[in-house]
Amino acid sequence: MATDYDSPRKTDDDSGDESLQELQTRRADTSSGRIDVDETDLAESLELPGADLSGEELSVQVIPPQADEFTCSRCFLVHHRSQRTSERDGQPVCLECAA
């Protein structure tokens, strides 16, 4: 038996006996002409691109690559040595870049 997937589907949950007035009053209750305004000062706490950050200090500790890590010559990310594939042009390449 073929099924027409474009035809409207009727389920047991659909109650077709609701009147137009009931639907209009329910719609009028949920929607109002009021605009939601965010009262928080979120815009003041955001940094814009190109902002002067010369007075800021780096608060992250940078750790150099360990003996069992390497830096991929394509993506420049530090990976564990298990992620290393054959070298290309004498430089190490990770599995993701080699694929």
Image: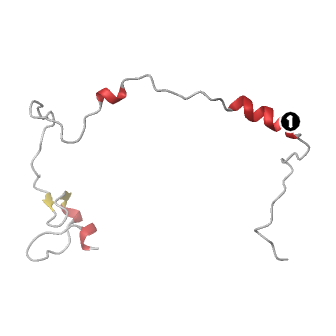
Q: Is residue 79 above or below residue 13?
A: below
Viewer-side residue, 84 vs 22: 22
Residue at point 73%, 29% (across, down): 29
- Residue 14: give x, y in percent of width and height: 84, 48
78 relative to 90 in the view: left or right: right
- Quadrant location of residue 94? bottom left
Q: Callout 1: few (<14), some (14-19), or many (20+) C-alpha neighbours within 10 Å?
A: few
- On the rendered image, what quadrant is the C terminus found in? bottom left
- Residue 77: give x, y in percent of width and height: 19, 57
- Quadrant location of residue 96? bottom left
Q: Is residue 87 above or below residue 11?
A: below
33 relative to 62 in the view: left or right: right
Residue at point 9%, 48% (across, down): 64
Q: Which amino acid lies under the numbered mark 1 shown in the image of this protein?
A: Gln
Colouring scheme applied when the structure was drawn: secondary structure
Q: Is residue 57 above or below residue 3?
A: above
Q: Which residue is mark 1?
A: 21
Q: Is residue 72 above or below residue 34?
A: below
Residue at point 44%, 22% (across, down): 39
